[in-house]
Image (tube, grey):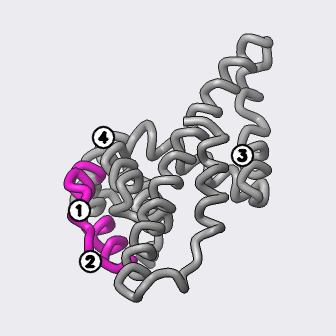
């Protein structure tokens, strides 16, 4: 898929007049557009992870010191996404986790079964886990891309925490208080 195709979609979407539809079609359009938005978020994540890998290889080939590899990649992503540099780095981190560690969550996002905010919740709630445990949470929660249909943000967050805590019983967990 290339940039021209995506830009064509933008033009097409900008020309859709909701007055040309009845209410049933408007609701269908809202759902379809939400699923498209999620699919685009997954595509952005894959693009960001691939850009990061490519830039790191180019920097390494250029002889950049190992401790400086990856510098400013998040800033470039931030510019492309019209976000702050801080947010660009967060988006890059999430993209790398989804692509490399949470394929089921990425698939749920790509198929429109999960939105970007909810994917972010799952990534955040598993940040303290080992790679194996994070992958286990991903498999348990998102292997069936429709399993989270009908769940609210809080329910998804709670379900993620429940599985994460069951897998890793080593306190303290994020958001918990240290014993006095």
Q: Which of marks 1 and 3 is in front?
A: 1
Q: Where is residue 35 in the image (x, y as percent from the top left)?
A: 42, 63
Q: Which mark is residue 150?
A: 2
User: Is 37 drawn above or below residue 177 in the view shown?
Assistant: above
Q: Is residue 60 left or right of residue 2?
A: right
According to the picture, the residue beneath numbered tag 4 turns out to be 132
Q: Nearer the viewer, mark 2 or mark 4?
A: 2
- Stretch of the chain drawn in magenta: 138-162
Q: In which quarter of the image is residue 27?
A: bottom left
Query: Which of marks 3 and 1 precedes in the sequence?
Result: 3
Is residue 56 in view from this perspective?
yes
Image point (23%, 62%), residue name: 146
User: Is 113 drawn above or below residue 105 in the view shown?
Assistant: below
Q: What's the distance in space between the residues labelled 4 and 1, CA to CA?
A: 23 Å
- Looking at the image, do the residues carrying marks 2 and 3 touch, with CB atoms under 8 Å apart? no
Q: Nearer the viewer, mark 4 or mark 1?
A: 1
Q: Residue 146 carries which label?
A: 1
Q: Under tag 3, what secondary structure?
A: helix
Q: In this view, does 91 lie to the left or right of 101?
A: right
Q: Quadrant of residue 172?
A: bottom left
- Looking at the image, do the residues carrying marks 2 and 1 touch, with CB atoms under 8 Å apart? no
Whether 34 is among the magenta residues is: no
Query: Which of marks 3 and 4 precedes in the sequence?
Result: 3
Q: Under tag 1, what secondary structure?
A: loop
Image point (39%, 49%), residue name: 106
Image point (40%, 88%), residue name: 23
User: Is 72 drawn above or below residue 134 in the view shown?
Assistant: above
């Amino acid at each position: 898929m290339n940039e021209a195709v995506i830009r064509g979609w933008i033009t097409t979407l900008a020309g859709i007049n909701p007055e040309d539809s009845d209410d049933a079609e408007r609701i269908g359009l809202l759902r379809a557009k939400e699923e498209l938005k999620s699919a685009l978020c997954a595509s952005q994540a894959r693009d960001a992870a691939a850009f990061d890998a490519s830039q790191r290889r180019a920097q390494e080939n250029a002889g950049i010191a190992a401790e400086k590899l990856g510098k400013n990649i998040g800033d470039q992503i931030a510019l492309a996404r019209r976000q702050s540099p801080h947010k660009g780095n967060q988006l890059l981190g999430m993209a790398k986790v989804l692509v490399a560690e949470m394929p089921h969550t990425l698939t749920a996002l790509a198929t429109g079964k999960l939105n970007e905010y909810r994917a972010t919740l799952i990534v955040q709630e598993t940040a303290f886990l080992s790679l194996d445990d994070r992958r286990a949470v991903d498999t348990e929660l998102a292997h069936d891309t429709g399993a989270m249909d009908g769940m609210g943000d809080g329910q998804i967050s709670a379900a993620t925490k429940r599985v994460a805590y069951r897998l890793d019983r080593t306190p303290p967990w994020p958001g918990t208080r240290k014993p006095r």
